[in-house]
Image (cartoon, rainbow, N blue to C red):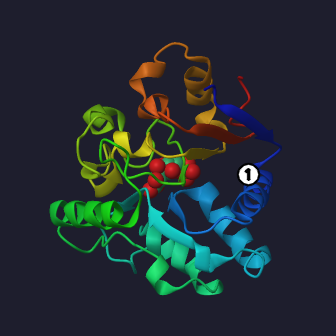
Amino acid sequence: MQPEIHIFPNNQAVARAFAEWLYQWLDGRQQVHIALSGGSTPQLLFSLLAEEYADKIRWDQVYLYWGDERCVPPTHEDSNYGVTQDLLLRHIDIPISNVHRIRGEENPEAEAEHYGEVIRSSLKLSEAGIPIFDLIILGMGADGHTASIFPHQMELLHADKVCAVATHPDTGQKRITLTGPVINQAKRIAFLVTGKSKTDKVRQVIRQEDEWQAYPVAHIKPVNGKTEWFLDQDAADEL
Ligand code: 6PG
């Protein structure tokens, strides 16, 4: 199934459009399992959800996870959970038991194993035993990474574990990430990608040109699901 591409004037418009899409998509659904992303565009989304959708969405029917997390404590400025807690979670009435954070403060290998079990025990499984998210929200780095699957660790796209320990190529920071098979088992994938730094990779990946297969994001193709890209004009400038 070809990905659907939505283009908006700027990053705020992307966040607003996706927030409204999410609200409409959630309407009437029960027990929805969503994996969140880190990054700048999701932060705009979280703020908007807190400001304008706190009382519109049935948060008790939403179960939150993370597609990746930095191996830092939740109070660290790099923590994806910490940012989400600050911008969204503390502003909405979501049962704490619905929020499954990756414990970045724990031993990475042990937490990757633990979080994989949290996901496996919370979600429906495919016939092959792969957990099925209802929705995974992803970003894309300027190097074509997604979640914390970086170009130098393409093997994570095919790992037979739910979660794996990754390493940021520049900083060496340890990360915990969903692996490719779990991401590609999702019913729905939404990429939120904005900014001029993404223009070239967006073109290569969407048009399957040049080095597109060298980028992890190009290998995100749900086996039974739908992919949508929410782009701003800058990121989509060469499409
Ligand atoms: C993270 C994200 C990462 C992010 C990209 C894009 O933990 O940082 O999971 O994959 O989505 O790096 O980030 P920006 O949207 O800020 O460019």
Task: In the rendered view, tell whether residue 133 sits above or below residue 218.
Answer: below
Amino acid type at circle 1 is Asn
Judge whether residue 10 can be spotted in this image.
yes
Q: Tag count in the figure? A: 1
At horizontal 57% and vertical 46% (from top left) the residue drawn is 188
Image-quadrant location for residue 115: bottom left
Is residue 84 toward the left or the right of residue 79 in the image? Answer: right
Name of the residue lying farthest toward the top? 210
Q: Quadrant of residue 72?
A: bottom left
55 sits left or right of 3 in the view = right
Could you tell me which secondary element the residue under label 1 belongs to?
helix
In the picture as drawn, the residue positioned furthest to the right comes out as 9
Circle 1 Cα neighbour tier, 10 Å, few/some/many (<14 / 14–19 / ≥20) = many
Q: Is residue 135 above or below residue 100?
A: above
The quarter of the rendered structure image containing the C terminus is: top right
> Label 1: which residue?
11
Q: Is mark 1 within 8 Å of ligand 1?
A: no
Please say if 239 is above or below 90. above
Residue sitting nearer the eye, 160 or 101 = 160
Residue 233 visible in the shown view = no
Which residue occupies 25% across, 39% down?
159
Task: Relative to 163, say whether 79 is above or below.
Answer: below
What x and y, as percent, mark residue 32?
56, 64
Q: 42 or 101, which is in the foreground?
A: 101
How far from the left and from the top, in percent, is residue 187? 54, 46
Quadrant in which the N terminus appears: top right
Q: Position of residue 212 (x, y in %)?
A: 48, 20
Compared across the picture, whether 66 is left or right of 238 comes to: left
- 100 and 6: which one is in front? 100
Residue 205, percent across and down?
Answer: 55, 24
**Residue ID at (68%, 63%):** 44
